[in-house]
Image: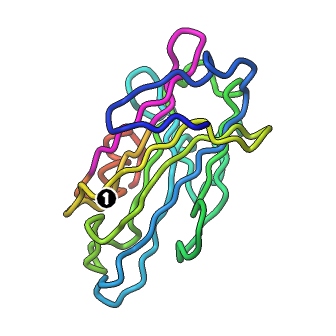
Amino acid sequence: MAVSLQKGQKVDLTKTNPGLTEVVIGLGWDTNKYDGGKDFDLDASAFVLNGQGKVAADSDFVFYGNKQNASASVLHSGDNRTGVGDGDDETIEVKLANLPAEAEKVSFTITIYEAAERGQNFGQVSNAYVRVLNKATGEELIRYDLGEDYSVETALVVAELYRHGSEWKFNAVGAGYKDGLAGLCRDFGVNIG
């Protein structure tokens, strides 16, 4: 049975699941019916971060346009432009043992594509969640339902995996950004030129 977390809670991932080497991060969401008539396109991304909370290279920003980092330890499933249907809208696979030694954290985000141009924000998104699955068995290990606490935000850091000694832990972050993907990239050290 999956551990259900609230914002800010942390839990052991590898210590409580011995032998766990690969996980799938599933992210999902729904959009509200009264969204202004324009299509929503939400995107999941991952940032592989060093001890200073920055990417070592731009390739450590993994998203639909760069589906894996240099070590192929973080893999993006591709862009789901509609979010229609049940289940995960986008997934990101993480091969824990293959992450570079300098990788201290992997942050998982959801952003709204062209949010400013379309007049959209996370106040118009519901049922957003992140979950961690054991890739080998498909078992859901951790789930974090984000709730409806956002209004002007156009990007969210939903969760992160982080090193704690030789183990990996999961943190339910739930932090909103009002300046979208550009703000995330700037904070995580990605060159957006």
Q: What amino acid is at disc 1?
A: Gly
Residue 151 in the figure: left or right of residue 171: left
Instruction: Name, please, the residue furthest toward the top.
Output: 165
User: Residue 61 placed where, x, y %?
Assistant: 52, 46
Query: How is the structure coloured here?
Result: rainbow
Residue 149: in magenta span: no
Instruction: Name, please, the residue furthest toward the front.
Output: 1
Q: Quadrant of residue 86?
A: bottom right
Q: Is residue 185 above or below residue 82?
A: above
Instruction: Determine if residue 70 is in view.
Output: no
Which of the two residues, 159 or 127, is positioned nearer the viewer here?
A: 127
Q: Quadrant of residue 180?
A: bottom left
Which of the two residues, 76 or 27, is positioned nearer the viewer here?
A: 27
Residue 157 in the figure: left or right of residue 18: left
Instruction: Determine if residue 130 is in view.
Output: yes
Q: Secondary structure at mark 1?
A: helix
Instruction: Name, please, the residue furthest toward the left.
Output: 152
Residue at 38%, 23% in the rendered image: 52
Residue at 46%, 64% in the rendered image: 29
User: Residue 85 placed where, x, y %?
Assistant: 58, 74
User: Residue 177 placed where, x, y %?
Assistant: 26, 52
User: Residue 32 placed where, x, y %?
Assistant: 35, 77
Residue at 71%, 18% in the rendered image: 18
Report how many numbered discs are placed on residues in the image.
1
Residue 170: in magenta span: yes
Give the position of the N terminus as an image quadrant. Answer: top right
Give the position of the C terminus as an image quadrant. Answer: bottom left
Q: Which residues are magenta?
A: 160-176
Magenta span: chief secondary structure? strand
Residue at numbered disc 1? 180
Residue at 67%, 28% in the rendered image: 96
